[in-house]
Amino acid sequence: MSFLRRRSGTPAGPDFDVLAMDPGDWPGLFGAAVMSGPDGSCQGIFLRYDLFGGRGPAMFIGNLPEGSPARDTPDGVPFEVRQLLAALEVEEPVDFVSAEDFPVMLRDDLLIVKKIKVSEERVFCAQFDRSDQVQVTIASWDRPIADDLYQLLKPLPADLFQQG
């Protein structure tokens, strides 16, 4: 996808399953991009869910392994939020406002979700860490992230994202 520029090399793809909403369950357009490191390793998978009718992106989901430079943003605004705003061509500056942890039941497990608030009030963001140290971030435009969204997240096999 054009919303991410490759730094160098062609990454082989992730060595982890990607937690996301199944593209078959999304009633719109879907795209995926691999973020590569200088050595060609996978530094993240980003999924873009667009609305039908050319109405633009509705949601980004990022899966970032431990050590990915996109995990640590100096201003506290998640990388996925920045990508969502760039895709929407929102040029106003956006700042981190606050973060708060919330418990969410995911099947039989308790998930601690960090809800991140930014200065752009139409952006909603949630973030959590998986047991394999992959950070999942969901950024949505103009729709709050409801607890039932987490029930729609499924592990998509890494081979779906392999290049070449």
Image: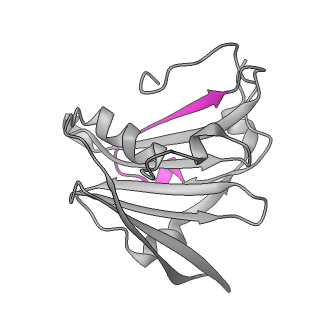
Q: Is residue 82 visible?
A: yes
Q: Quadrant of residue 14?
A: top right
Q: Is residue 140 above or below residue 54?
A: below
Q: Is residue 47 above or below residue 26?
A: above
- Give me the residue at 67% from left, 34% from top: 161
Q: Position of residue 6 (x, y in %)?
A: 57, 18
Of 160 and 146, the residue lying toward us: 146
Q: Position of residue 115 (x, y in %)?
A: 43, 70
- Give me the residue at 51% from left, 66% from top: 152
Of 77 and 161, the residue lying toward us: 77
- Report the residue that reaches farthest toward the front: 74
Q: Which residues are magenta?
A: 22-36
Q: Position of residue 41 (x, y in %)?
A: 77, 28
Does residue 23 appear to the left or right of 58 in the view shown?
A: right
- Give me the residue at 19% from left, 39% from top: 92
Q: Is residue 31 magenta?
A: yes
Of 117 and 135, the residue lying toward us: 117
